[in-house]
Image: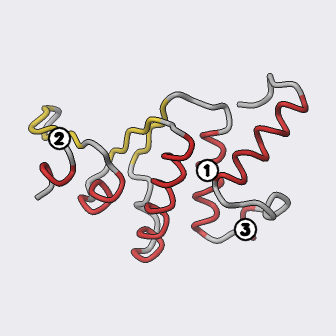
Amino acid sequence: GLKKMKRAEHDERLASVIELVGLKGFEKRYPHELSGGQQQRVALARAMAPNPSIILFDEPFSNLDADLQIKIRDELRTILKKAGITSIFVTHDQADARAIADRVILMENGHILKTGTPDLILC
């Protein structure tokens, strides 16, 4: 997503996103040299690099173990808040929705059942 940028602008954006996701110092590593959490942060950095106005996440934590899932979702909320990027999360995990969402839309069979804050919707 950064191919159309001038080199200086590209390098500046890349450095900014790497620092934002907490991977400064890991730029030269290959994917197999990174932990599962670091790989998730690389994916997030790649999605954020072109500075989108919105990012869609579809079950982003489903392939992580429970401990890593908790750590990553807390980090992800912080990163997205700092970046000011609107995000839509599709999840079946109420704990993920409660930890990350500002607003929740509860759906069943393609129909909206409830909308509101996590505390009101996910009781």
Q: Is residue 6 left or right of residue 108?
A: right
Residue at image mark 3: 32
Q: Is residue 78 left or right of residue 123?
A: right
* Callout 1 secondary element: helix
**Circle 3/circle 1 CB separation < 8 Å:** no
Under mark 3, the amino acid is: His
> Eyeballing the image, is 26 above or below 103?
below
Q: What x and y, as percent, mark residue 49?
A: 67, 38
Q: Earlier in the sequence, mark 2 or mark 1?
A: 1
Q: Earlier in the sequence, mark 2 or mark 3?
A: 3
> Eyeballing the image, is 92 above or below 6?
below
Under mark 2, the amino acid is: Gly
Quarter of the rendering containing residue 62: bottom left
Q: What x and y, as percent, mark residue 5?
A: 81, 25
> Eyeballing the image, is 11 above or below 123?
above
Q: How is the image coloured?
A: secondary structure
Q: CA distance from mark 3 to mark 1?
A: 14 Å
Residue sitting at the far front: 82
Label 1, residues with CA under 10 Å away: few <14, some 14-19, many ≥20: few
Q: How many numbered marks have been drawn onto this rendered protein structure? A: 3
Q: What x and y, as percent, mark residue 15?
A: 79, 47
Residue 96: numbered disc = none
Quadrant of image for the N terminus: top right
* Callout 2 secondary element: strand
Residue 116: numbered disc = 2
Q: Earlier in the sequence, mark 3 or mark 1?
A: 3
Residue sitting at the far top: 4
Residue at image mark 1: 43
Residue found 47% across the figure and 70% down from its top: 71
Residue sitting at the far bottom: 67
Quadrant of image for the C terminus: bottom left
